[in-house]
Image (spheres, rainbow, N blue to C red):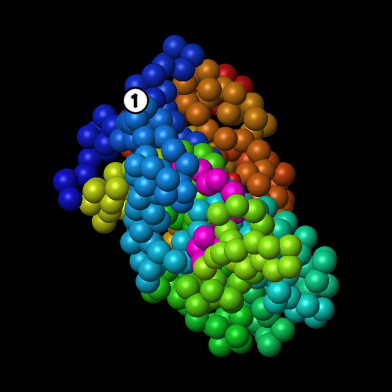
Amino acid sequence: PAGFTAELVRQDFPVLHRNVNGHPLVWLDNAATTQKPRQVIEALAAYYGSANSNIHRGAHTMAREATEAYEAGRAAVADFLGAPNPDGVVFVRGTTEAVNLVAQSWGRANLGPGDDILVPVLEHHSDIVPWQMIAKETRARVVPVPLTPGGDIDQDAYADLLSSRTQLVAISHASNVLGTVPPVKEMTALAHRYGAKVLVDGAQAVAHFPVDVQDLNADFYAFSGHKLFAPTGIGVLYTKPELVAGMTPWQGGGNMIESVGFGKTTFAAAPHKMEAGTGHISGVIGLLAAVNWLTSLDRKAVAAYEEGLMSYALQTLATVPGLELIGSAADRIAVLTFTLAGQDPAGVADWLDRDGIAIRAGHHCAQPALAHYGLESAARASLALYNTSDEVDRLVASLRRLQQSA
Ligand code: PMP
C-alpha cells in the first residue's frame, strides 16, 4: 500500500474542493455520510456510460459483464469483511434494511413468547425499532442493556441480562453518537454461551478500522455503503453461510427463485434467495470501487492518523468556553458529540454552516443514548480519514467566535 497522508487522499475527493457560503468546505458530517472519491464517481459513470445492463439473465455480452461485475462486488465485500465465502453476503439498501431483513426472516422464525432480544441503550434507532416491531408480533421482549456514565455498555449488567431466554443480541461495532467501540468479540462469545445469535451493526465501524467477521464470530454483520465512501442505496448484510442457508426469504419476486409454479415454488440458494427483484447494480459497482480504493490504503496508518486527529480535536475543543463533550469511552472512533452552554445545537450547526463547516445537530437517531445524558439534542462533528488538523482548527475558531458573540 502507498503511504497514507490526508493531503494525498483529499486529492481523490472533488467535493472537498468546493466552497460553501464563501468558505472552503469543512466536511465534519461523516457519521451521517461520507464523501465519494473520484474512483467511485468514475466507476458509476463508466458503468452507465458503457456497460449498463440487467444481470443474471445471461442473454448477451453486457448482461454477462454486469453479472460478473456484480458478483465481483460480492467477492470483494466478502474479502473486506473476512467472510469465509461470498454466499453469506447479501446486498441490501443499507444497514436499516439489513436489520429489518434479519428481524423479518430470522426473527419471525426464531422468536416467540418469553424470548429476549438484548439491545444496548447506545443503539441507533435502526437497531431498536425493527426489534420492537418483530417482538410485538412474536410476543418476544426487547431488553435494554444499560450504559455506564462514560457511555460504555455496562458489561456486568449485560452478563446479568443474558439467559437461556436470550435469542439475539444486537450491538453496534461503533456508536454514531458517542463513538464507543464496545468489546464486540467478547460480548459475542458470552452471548454464544447462552445459544443466542449476535447481530453487529458495523455502519460506523467499517470506514474507520478493518473488520474480520470470523474473528468476531458474528452471526450477522451489517453496514451501509454510503458511510464507506460508496453510493447511497447500497448496503450489506453478512450472515454466517450455515445460518443463511436455513433462513426463509423475507421478500419474494424475480431473481430469488429456482422454479415457480402455482402448485409449488422453490427458492434459489443463498445469497440469491435474499435478493428479490433487480438489485442496485450500479450501487454494487460503486461499492466495489470504494472497497478497492479504501483497501489500497495502509489501513493501520489510516487508523493511527484518525486517532491522532481525534486526540487533537479533543484537546482543542476543550478550550472552547462552555463546551461539554458527551461520552468518554476509552475505545472510540472519531465522533465528537457536544453541547455549548447557552446555545441550541441547531443554532450551533447553523452558525458553523455560515463558515462552511458541516456538522449535524439533533438526536442522531439515538434518542435513548442522548436521554442517558438528559439530552434531547446535541451537536456532532464526525471525522474521516480526509479531515485535517487545519479543519479542526477552523471548527474550534468558529465555535470560539460564537461564544464571544453571545
Ligand atoms: N446504525 C448506525 C450505528 C448508524 O450510524 C446508522 C446511520 N446513521 C445506521 C445504523 C443506519 O444506516 P442507514 O441509514 O444507512 O440504513
Is residue 327 at least partly visible in the picture? no
Is residue 295 at least partly visible in the picture? yes
- Residue 11 among those drawn in magenta: no
Name the residue rendered at 42%, 49% in the picture: 58
- Magenta-highlighted stretch: main secondary structure? loop
Disc 1 packing (10 Å; few <14; some 14–19; many ≥20): few
**283 to 95, vertically: above or below:** above
The residue carrying mark 1 is 14
Name the residue rendered at 47%, 73% in the picture: 241
Name the residue rendered at 46%, 61% in the picture: 89
| Nearer to the camera, 328 or 249 | 249
Left or right: where 315 falls relative to 168: left
| Nearer to the camera, 127 or 363 | 127
Image coordinates of residue 276 in percent, x first then y, are: 60, 54
Image coordinates of residue 291 in percent, x first then y, are: 34, 49
Q: Which range of residues does the magenta coloring cover?
A: 270-282
Left or right: where 170 falls relative to 231: right
At label 1, the amino acid type is Pro
Image coordinates of residue 314 in percent, x first then y, are: 43, 45
Secondary structure at numbered mark 1: helix
Report which quarter residue 402 is drawn in: top right
Name the residue rendered at 46%, 51% in the picture: 56
| Nearer to the camera, 160 or 76 | 76
